[in-house]
Amino acid sequence: MTEVKFMQHKQNELSSMQTLKQEAADSDLFSIGETAQMIDSTVKTVRYYDEIQLVKASFVNNRGYRFYTTETIWRLQLVKTLRELRFGIDDIKKLLSGEISIETSLDWQIETLQTEVQALNGMIAILNNARSIVNDYSKDSKTTPSPFLSHIHELVHIQKQNQQSRQQFVLTKIEEIGFMSDIPAEWQDAFFHYFNKYILHPENLSAKQLMAWKELKELISSPEFIADLQSVEFLFVNIAQHPIYETKEWVRLMQSIQKRLSTALRNNYEPHSSYVQAVVDDAIQLYSHSNAASNSQEILQMIEVHIEKLETKNFKRSVMLCSNLSPEFEQLSQRDNLLFRGLRWKLQQINL
């Protein structure tokens, strides 16, 4: 009896293998090694893209071997090309999923590269100027330090603008605008904690970060941006002025929500998923304040109005510059985007 079962098991296994071979022949499946070779990449890279769900394998057999169709290979080739053009993984994910259009994605990448080019051109200009001075400088001067050194120092100084000066600049601007004037001191401390953590954290700026900070300074100093800022009734201001939580408790709950949103992003949870919607429910409570309506729908509508007012050209530009300045802010922006999409989905369901 045992031998009969063994033979049946082997026959089933052979039948499965024949089926797999036929499926491979019918759909032109290629192994992961063949796929990597076709796009001039590595097996490790192709496997990584599958693991992070950027480009999933078309088929995985019962031994765990990955296979790819010609269509999937084309997507992998597209990803490889975009990576060579220095697109980030998250931007490619949004592009492939249709979350952002190809036009928007290209515009973002062009702006990013232009920012880097401007920074590099600025450094090249300083070095060329320094080299010119060295060529003109008398070689027999032994007592006076060469002006070349001062120009090199200028380059180093530009690259290493310290965190304290950036903090002071932002603090001065906030005081000028009066954005935080009516907020209790402990809530101001909470605001600046997050601002420093997510925007002003990098101590030594790269060329790209330097140009982003330079443009951000110009933007937040412009009358147009200040007018946009003053027209928005920020949720944080209302929360701080009419709190229903102690400051430390509110910060703790906000940190918990951010951690859960990070988990949602890692697992590619959709805005309508039960996991994200549970986070949305907690966020509604956190965004509420003592003067807010007790009805969840009205709170959601208030939040949506707030989000819409932040979708001006200047605000969008500031978010992009802050993302260039700080990877931490870029991650925060992605979490907030998922949360806001979840909030809008919930409001749509209520309005049905």
Image (tube, grey):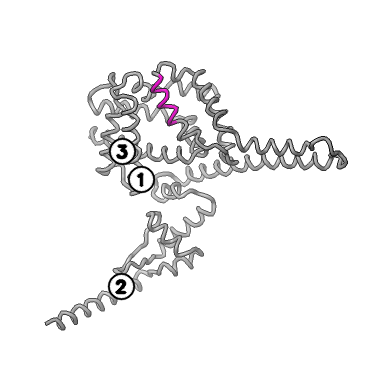
Q: Earlier in the sequence, mark 2 or mark 3?
A: 2
Q: What stretch is highlighted in magenta?
A: 185-194
Locate the N terminus and report the quarter of the image it occupies.
bottom left
Q: What element carries label 1?
A: helix
Residue 233 shown in magenta: no
Report the residue at 35% width, 21% height from top: 238
Report the residue at 18% width, 80% height from top: 6
Res 117 quadrant in image: top right
Q: Mark 1 points at which residue?
A: 265
For the view shown, which residue lies furthest in the front direction? 143
Res 119 quadrant in image: top right
- Measured in 3D between alpha carbons, the distance from the residue under mark 3 to the one under mark 1, in whole angstroms, is 12 Å
Q: Where is residue 79 in the image (x, y as percent from the top left)?
A: 47, 55
- Measured in 3D between alpha carbons, the distance from the residue under mark 2 to the one under mark 3, in whole angstroms, is 40 Å
Asked if marks 3 and 1 touch (Cβ < 8 Å), the reply is no
Report the residue at 52% width, 28% height from top: 167
Q: What element carries label 3?
A: helix
Q: Is mark 2 on a helix, strand or loop?
A: helix
